Image: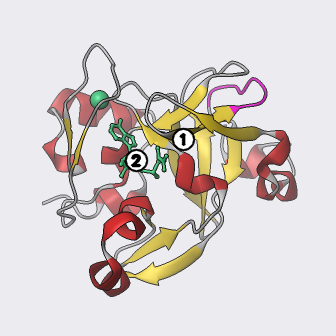
Amino acid sequence: MPLSSNPIALDRLADPSSRVRVAAARIGQGLFARGPFDVGEPILKLAGRVVNYEVLWERGGRFLDNCIRFGPETYLDPGDGVGRYVNHSCEPNAAIHKWRNQLFLIAARRIRRGNELVFDYSTTIGDDDIWTMRCDCGAHDCRKRIKRFGSLAPELQRRYREQGLVPKYILETLR
Ligand SMILES: C[S@@+](CC[C@H](N)C(=O)[O-])C[C@H]1O[C@@H](n2cnc3c(N)ncnc32)[C@H](O)[C@@H]1O
Ligand SMILES: [Zn+2]
């Protein structure tokens, strides 16, 4: 469901407390659904500060790990917001969607109350990004190492694209 036709008021998405909670997860802290979400339903607006890629190079470490690609040369620093707790899974139930120059976490599948919210980090890693991560998501088809979107198997790339789970600015980095 496109955000523009979704009946949920955007200001409710900006206040995540009624929709998600942070709790212990398989991997450190994670973000969990407080209610059910339908496929395509926006879950929350990812708040934070948009920074240039040079800031990531300068600060590196945990700061870099928590940032989410925002545009051709920019990243969203979620700061201490709930957006910094979304873990990766190779079997995701959520995705990142950019709308009106803001990032949202949306449901990629039907999500039940209590489910951990996870997205596939590769859908937000451009082909010009060099960041990689060892994966311990536990999924049957875990890829073990998470890399740029263009490194995914063609069939998986096609499925994510068809489902509208890859931001346009990531597709534009494909070689
Ligand atoms: C945005 S944070 C997610 C919150 C994190 N679990 C915490 O407690 O701070 C991203 C970091 O969590 C870890 N992480 C997330 N998903 C992972 C996964 N599937 N396998 C291994 N580490 C993961 C990595 O260290 C990654 O850099
Ligand atoms: Zn995995």
Q: Of all residues shown, which one is farthest toward the top? A: 140
In this rendering, the answer to whether 79 lies above or below 51 is above
Q: Which residue is mark 1?
A: 29
Residue 96 percent across, percent down from the top left: 51, 49
Q: Which mark is residue 147?
A: none
Could you tell me which residue is drawn at 28 percent across and 13 percent down?
A: 140
| Amino acid tagged 2 | Val
Task: Give the residue displayed 46% in from the left and 41% down from the top.
Answer: 87
Question: Is disc 2 placed on a helix, strand or loop?
Answer: loop
- Classify residue 115 as left or right of residue 9: left
Indicate the quadrant where residue 33 lies. Answer: top right
Q: Is residue 53 above or below residue 22?
A: below
Classify 46 as above or below 111. Answer: below
Alpha-carbon span between mark 1 and mark 2: 25 Å
Q: Which residue is mark 2?
A: 166
**Mark before the other along the chain sequence, 1 or 2:** 1
Residue 169 % position (x, y): 37, 64
User: Does the beta carbon at disc 2 come under 8 Å from ligand 2?
Assistant: no
Q: Is residue 108 above or below residue 58?
A: above
Count of numbered circles in the view: 2
Disc 1 crowd, CA 10 A, few/some/many (<14, 14-19, 20+): some
Task: Give amino acid for label 1.
Answer: Gln
Residue 77 as seen in the image, left or right of residue 14: left
In the rendered image, the quadrant that contains the C terminus is bottom left
Q: Is mark 1 within 8 Å of ligand 1?
A: yes
Q: Is residue 59 magenta?
A: no
What is the magenta range?
A: 33-39
